[in-house]
Image (cartoon, coloured by chain):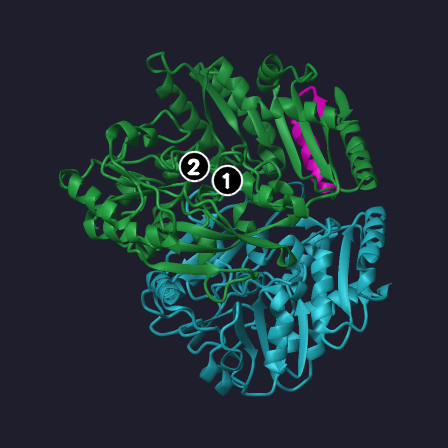
Amino acid sequence: MELPEPNPQILARRDQIVARLRAALPGNDVISDPAETRAYECDALTAYRCAPMAVVLPRSTEEVSAVLRVCHEEGVPVVPRGAGTSLAGGSLPTADSVIIGVARMREVLEIDTANRCVRVQTGITNLAVTGAVEDRGFFYAPDPSSQLACAIAGNIAMNSGGAHCLKYGVTTNNLLGVTMVLMDGTVLRLGGPWMDAPGLDLLGVVCGSEGQLGVVTEAWLRILPKPEGARPVLIAFGSNEVAGACVADIIRAGILPVAIEFMDRPCIRACEDFAHAGYPDCEALLIVEVEGSEAEIGEQIGLIRQIAARHDPVEFREAGSAEEAGRIWLGRKSAFGAMGQIADYMCLDGTIPVSALPLVLRRIGELSREFGLDVANVFHAGDGNMHPLILFDANKPGDLERCEALGAAILRLCVEVGGCLSGEHGVGIEKRDLMVAQFDPADMEAQMRVKDCFDPHWLLNAAKVFPLQVSAPRRVAA
Amino acid sequence: MRTESEAELAEAIRSATGPLAIRGGGTRAPAPASGDRLDTAGLSGVVLHEPGALTLVAGAGTPLAEVEALLAAEGQRLPFEPPDMRGLLGREGISTLGGVTAANASGPRRVQAGACRDHLIGVRFVDGSGTVIRNGGRVMKNVTGYDLVKLMAGSHGTLGVLTELSFKVLPTPEAETTLAIDGLEPAAAVAAMAAALSTPWEVSGAAHHVGGAAWLRIEGFAASVAYRAARLAEALAPFGSVTEAADSRAIWRAVRDVEPFHDRPGDVWRLSVRPSEAPEVAGRAGADDALMDWGGGRLWLLMPPGTDLRARLGAFEGHAMLLRAAPQTIAQLGSFPPEPAPVATLSAGLRRRFDPRGILNPGLMG
């Protein structure tokens, strides 16, 4: 993984730039001591690290605007940061960059249950949005695994999903409006507490633009009434293929579960060793969760049971209590922790057409043997969003490189079968150089035109998303 | 000009010497753009329908009716309930999938299932210089690169001409029912709809014809629909007498297609507002008739011809589109609302970059 060479002229002006940033922010909100900026050298993709030149933690949209104006005038690259939980390196700094963190902007500004929406500052965590409205019977639907820590700012930048988006959609489907600041300090509002755009859907392209178009400081989010109840079932199968076929049949039958999670044998075993959830000994298992009243849950689970029976399951386990439901989810929710106990791992998130599931799992097995690294699979099966976890040993020379090569091979496979490189984590630095596998030059050119328009000098998070050689003419010209 | 393939279409755009008026079925654009007509009807046909993956891919010129029939045969549908605007706008023609997408045309189910743009998962289009561009794909979750799919939905042909579209589709529920409450003033109707939409019973339609009833739709498996309708009726009892409507499908077709305004003179405005403010906005408009959909969030107003509704309303939270009026009124007021300066600059910048010669439906959106 390569970062652009830091601009020596910017590094030489470091003290002057930091002084201007301090002047722009009245509070004690500029960090420039290298001992402290190190805390910002990476996000959740810890394999890559680079401390920024400075970190600013503004407290309002106006302060974000003031800081961006300084950076714009000084020609300093800016990397926006939410809570730093990106798995794709979305907030990895460059050495000549200023990090703008929204961590001090966490207010809930307006709760409007009559119109089923809230307005928040984007430093608020995902779970805190639900926390602010759940006593009134509402929740915020997108639920990335990191929801306890991750910020809405990052959710918007990456268009984050989660286990329950099969029914409720991802961030873009639950985002009504934003206040954002462009690189030159311009503040603008897109959307609001209504349901469509007056002209071009700029909000639609800002969501998922990985912090490359502006810094989003406030958001209007759609909130939903909490379901009456929810219950998971666990279905164990003798092969991945059969489990995959069962998923397709459930979907075709007209049942819309809120989640269909899939785990393969290596993952089941690791979770079992780690969390002792009591999972059956099998090749593949599904966790299917349905919602509604007691009777509605019963009806849906009855249908799922009939469908599963046609696929000769090893076991069908329905949660009879909240405790049993918790145990069914326990292994799945501890999957990443379990893997972390065994080895270092890299988590991919390529998405495939559901029909390609058996083929892709078989090919991943072959690639795993070819590269000599174990791969465990746990993923959102209903929408084909894979999460292969490649296990490696960071202390073993060459292992990280082998892991990266295997990851690239798996993602190319996802694209070959009609899928994509990233279903919910974003491209960031991690999948940047693979973009050419999915997009022709004209496709990337079209995307970069959007950035030209919002950030003509390519100062915002410009080392991400597009391969460096593809973006070079723009970054250099700027 | 009619083209039969994406390559022909790209060539037609490359060799164009003046403005092009992009046309699907000609059923829903507020006013035809000026220029040589470029038809997409030749780009017709379903490329892929995978019912188990809830995916449909089709050419932009494919008739909407053909897509809906194909899906219906598998017990599926486009969840966003695209309206048929022919009756309202007095058009002939055959609505195409590309036209639906270019207008981000979404019906009553928007409140629960989302809009056209929420189900669009992939596009192919030709930009103003004749280059073919792909974005998204055929999978439901995709955050690889920028989401130009959303940008193209509702871009009315001004950034590029859509050639192929991928949609997430959903199973058609086994049953539906509609509850009606008669005799509500607009404020009470919006309050009742808000109360309904705030219950866990998954209301998939919430509309009110001013002077008529408020309607609330529930869909799903039969037993579940019966259960939720009963609970919802209890919850709405404080608002008035709740009855089960006789023909749920006809009610929602009427709301979707704005049937109360068909064959009636006057201009048609479509507003997006904060739902709870719909009664106040509608009152200030002084409309001849008003239909509220999306729990109040979408407001259809029938206005005396030539009324400058935006001037009359002044600032409000939302926006107003002029959908039907005499050509000179549309030319004078503009179909699309003016945008605040920084947003207008970005929109103009995008158009300039995707259509450097300014030949795709020029002037249509501003």
Decide which of A435, B318 is in the foreground and name it.
B318
Determine the image quadrant of residue A104: top left
Name the magenta segment's main secondary structure. Answer: helix
Decide which of A270, B328 is in the foreground and name it.
A270
Decide which of A356, A149 is in the foreground and name it.
A149
Label 2 element class? loop
Chain under numbered label 1:
A
Whether the residues at callouts 2 and 1 have beta carbons within 8 Å, the answer is yes
Q: Say whether residue A59 is left or right of residue A161.
A: left
Q: Tell me, what hue is chain A?
A: green
Query: Which one of the lettered chains is coloured cyan?
Result: B
Location of mark 1 (residue): A125
* Residue type at the position of mark 1: Thr
Image: magenta residue range: A235-253
Location of mark 2 (residue): A83
Q: Say whether residue B312 is left or right of residue A54.
A: right
Q: Position of residue A364 (x, y in %)?
A: 51, 23
* Residue type at the position of mark 2: Ala
Q: Is residue A311 above or below residue B160?
A: above
Q: Position of residue A297 (x, y in %)?
A: 79, 38
Q: At 36% from the left edge and 12% from the top edge, which residue is drawn?
A: A395
Q: Is residue A264 above or below residue B58?
A: above
Q: Say whether residue B291 is left or right of residue B146.
A: right
Residue A252 in magenta stretch: yes
Decide which of B288, A55 is in the foreground and name it.
A55
State the CA–CA distance, disc 2 to disc 1: 8 Å
Q: Is residue A344 above or below residue A433?
A: above
Residue B57 visible to an observer of this rendering: no
